[in-house]
């Protein structure tokens, strides 16, 4: 993997790094800590929630499956994958497919606290997997119908877990956050640093 001048020491790993995600947000977050993947590959896996599956095991299963799927194409590289879920109560909210999904998600999140979990998996050459899960608690202000309609109409929440992007307009809805901000964006940088650097 290559890195900009003055990059973090974790960017000097000897093996090439493949990011198993086409998310521009994850790529940008890696760049913040001096990491530029050698390749970006979108994993093709089924992300359906299994019957009775809890949020943490679900995120871990998908992150590991993404890493392993890409590792089959790049067996000599390190594969970094992640999966982010937004949880209201015990319910895993979907990646919003359209404006209607965004409205439903924001209606559930309005005026309450929810959890954002991101599982990060690193598949090493030889198939060994290392994984961690980050948890952040986010509290939303109570939203009016006008708030929800305006946000849904802007299109930002489509394709996002829980129907919102904290790095965009939705940050104005956040009354409190406890934990990693980058986790809510989609890639907890402290966890990535630990996995790539060999730390806990």
Image (cartoon, helix red, strand yellow):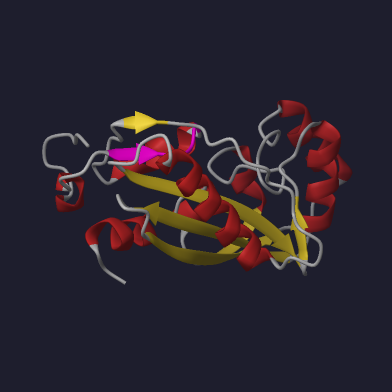
Q: Is residue 152 visible?
A: yes
Task: Depth check: give the residue in front, 8 or 1.
Answer: 1
Q: Quadrant of the C terminus?
A: bottom left
Q: Quadrant of the N terminus?
A: top left
In the displayed structure image, the side of residue 88 where residue 190 appears, left or right: left
Residue visible at 79% across and 31% down in the picture: 98
In the displayed structure image, the side of residue 123 where residue 106 appears, left or right: right
Report the residue that reaches farthest toward the left.
6
Residue visible at 28% across and 56% down in the picture: 196
Percent x, y of residue 191 = 38, 61
Q: Is residue 71 above or below residue 58?
A: above
The quadrant in which residue 198 appears is bottom left
Segment tinted magenta in the rendering: 17-22
Residue visible at 50% across and 65% down in the picture: 133
The quadrant in which residue 135 appears is bottom right
Task: Depth check: give the residue in front, 67 or 120.
Answer: 67
Q: Is residue 129 above or below residue 80?
A: below
Task: Depth check: give the residue in front, 13 or 123.
Answer: 123
Is residue 21 part of the magenta span, yes or no? yes
Residue visible at 67% across and 35% down in the picture: 159
Percent x, y of residue 136 = 55, 65
Report the residue that reaches farthest toward the top.
154
Percent x, y of residue 72 = 43, 40
Q: Is residue 1 above or below residue 55?
A: above
Percent x, y of residue 138 = 62, 62
Q: Is residue 184 visible?
A: no
Is residue 153 part of the magenta span, yes or no? no
């Amino acid at each position: 993997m290559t890195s900009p001048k003055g990059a973090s020491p974790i960017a000097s790993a000897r093996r090439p790094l493949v990011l198993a995600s086409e998310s521009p947000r994850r790529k940008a977050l890696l760049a913040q800590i001096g990491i530029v993947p050698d390749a970006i590959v979108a994993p093709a896996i089924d992300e359906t929630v299994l019957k009775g599956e809890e949020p943490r095991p679900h995120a871990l299963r998908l992150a590991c499956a993404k890493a392993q799927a890409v590792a089959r194409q790049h067996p000599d590289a390190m594969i970094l994958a992640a999966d982010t879920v937004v949880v209201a109560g015990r319910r895993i909210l979907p990646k919003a497919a359209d404006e209607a999904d965004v409205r439903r998600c924001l209606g559930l999140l309005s005026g309450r606290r929810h959890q954002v979990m991101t599982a990060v998996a690193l598949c090493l050459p030889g198939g060994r997997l290392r994984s961690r899960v980050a948890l952040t608690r986010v509290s939303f202000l109570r939203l009016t119908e006008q708030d929800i309609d305006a946000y849904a109409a802007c299109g930002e929440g489509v394709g996002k877990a829980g129907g919102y992007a904290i790095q965009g307009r939705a940050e104005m809805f956040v009354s409190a956050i406890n934990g990693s901000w980058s986790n809510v964006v989609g890639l907890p940088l402290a966890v990535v640093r630990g996995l790539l650097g060999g730390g806990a």
